[in-house]
Image: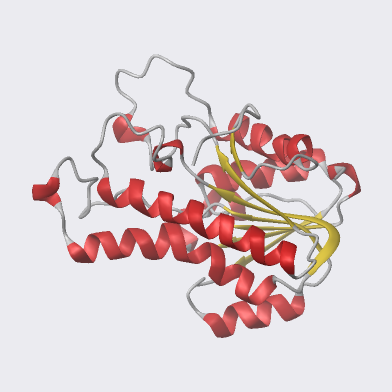
C-alpha cells in the first residue's frame, strides 16, 4: 500500500487524542478525502477548528447501528479505516489495582468500548473497502498475555486481550472469504493523552505527543502492509498475543 495513492480514509474517534493526531497526519501526508468521526462536540473543538478542503467531519454514535449502516452506504471505496476509540478511566471509573476493585458494570463498559466497536464497525463496512485497503485498530501492549508481568488493570487488560482475539478472528474470516482488506492492530507507545496523563509520573521512556504518535502510526500502516503479522508496536516490531 502507498498512502500517497489513497483517496478515502475514515477515522473513528477523531475528535481528540490519537484519533486527532492521526487525522492531522493523514491531512499532512496524503491527498485523500478524510472522514473524521467524533462522538461529542465538546471534546472535538480542535478537530472542528481545522480548515482543510480534504476534511469532512461528522458526529456519530458507534453503537447506533442504523447510523453505521447509513454511513457505510454513503462511503464506499475506502482505502483506510482507523478505529481509535478506547476507554481506560473517567471521573467515576478507575483501573482496578486488585480483585477488590472488580465491578461488573465497569468491566462490561470497558469490554463494550475496547472490544466490541472493532467488529461492529466491520459488520457494516466489510463491503466498503477497495482491493488494497487496511483496517487499523489501536491495541495495547498491556493486552498481551505473554508480556503481562505486573497484573492489575483487569478491565483494560482483559478487554484489550479480547480485542486481540477479535482481530485474529476477523483476519481468518477475511482470508477465507477472499477479502483483501489488511487487518492491523497497533500499540502506539506511551502517548500524552487524556487517557494516559494520570499515569505518566515516573515514566522514563519516551512519551509521544499525539501529533508524533499519529505520524508514527500512519506510516506504520504502509511499512507492515505486506507483512503477515497482525499485532505491532509503533516501531514495527511484532508484539506477542
**Residue found 29% across the figure and 65% down from its top:** 108
Q: Is 158 left or right of 25, judged from the image as shown?
A: left
Instruction: Pinpoint residue 69: horizontal percent, then vertical percent.
Output: 64, 82
Residue 94 position (above or below residue 76): above
Q: Residue at x 25, y 36 (%)?
A: 151
**Picture coordinates of residue 209, whole percent (x, y):** 53, 29
In the shown orientation, is residue 15 left or right of residue 128? Answer: left
Residue for point 80% across, 66% down: 178
Q: Nearer the viewer, residue 104 or 145?
A: 145
Please provide percent x and percent y for residue 1.
85, 45
Query: Seen in the image, is 89 located left or right of residue 102?
Result: right
Q: Residue furthest left?
A: 100
Q: Residue furthest top?
A: 204
Which image quadrant for residue 176? Answer: bottom right
Query: Picture coordinates of residue 163 (x, y %)?
Result: 47, 55
Residue shown at 35%/46% (left/top)? Answer: 157
User: Relative to the observer, which residue lies in front, 117 or 174?
Assistant: 174
Q: Quadrant of residue 222?
A: top right
* Front one among 73 and 116: 116
Amino acid at each position: 500500500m502507498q498512502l500517497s495513492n489513497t483517496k478515502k480514509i475514515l477515522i473513528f474517534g477523531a475528535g481528540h487524542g490519537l484519533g486527532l493526531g492521526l487525522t492531522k497526519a493523514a491531512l499532512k501526508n496524503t491527498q485523500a478525502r478524510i472522514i473524521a468521526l467524533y462522538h461529542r462536540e465538546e471534546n472535538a473543538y480542535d478537530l472542528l477548528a481545522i480548515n482543510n478542503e480534504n476534511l469532512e467531519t461528522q458526529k456519530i454514535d458507534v453503537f447506533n447501528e442504523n447510523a453505521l449502516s447509513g454511513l457505510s452506504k454513503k462511503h464506499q471505496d475506502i482505502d483506510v479505516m482507523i478505529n481509535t476509540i478506547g476507554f481506560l478511566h473517567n471521573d467515576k471509573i478507575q483501573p482496578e489495582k486488585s480483585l477488590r476493585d472488580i465491578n461488573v458494570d465497569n468491566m462490561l463498559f470497558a469490554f463494550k468500548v475496547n472490544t466490541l466497536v472493532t467488529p461492529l464497525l466491520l459488520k457494516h463496512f466489510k463491503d466498503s473497502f477497495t482491493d488494497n485497503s487496511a483496517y487499523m485498530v489501536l491495541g495495547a501492549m498491556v493486552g498481551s498475555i505473554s508480556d503481562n508481568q505486573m497484573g492489575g488493570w483487569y478491565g483494560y487488560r482483559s478487554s484489550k486481550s479480547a480485542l486481540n482475539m477479535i482481530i485474529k478472528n476477523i483476519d481468518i474470516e477475511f482470508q477465507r472469504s477472499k477479502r483483501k482488506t489488511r487487518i492491523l492492530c497497533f500499540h502506539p507507545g506511551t502517548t500524552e493523552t487524556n487517557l494516559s496523563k494520570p499515569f505518566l509520573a515516573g515514566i522514563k521512556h519516551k512519551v509521544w505527543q499525539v501529533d508524533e504518535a499519529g505520524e508514527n502510526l500512519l506510516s506504520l500502516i504502509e511499512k507492515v502492509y505486506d507483512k503477515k503479522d497482525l499485532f505491532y508496536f509503533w516501531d514495527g516490531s511484532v508484539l506477542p498475543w
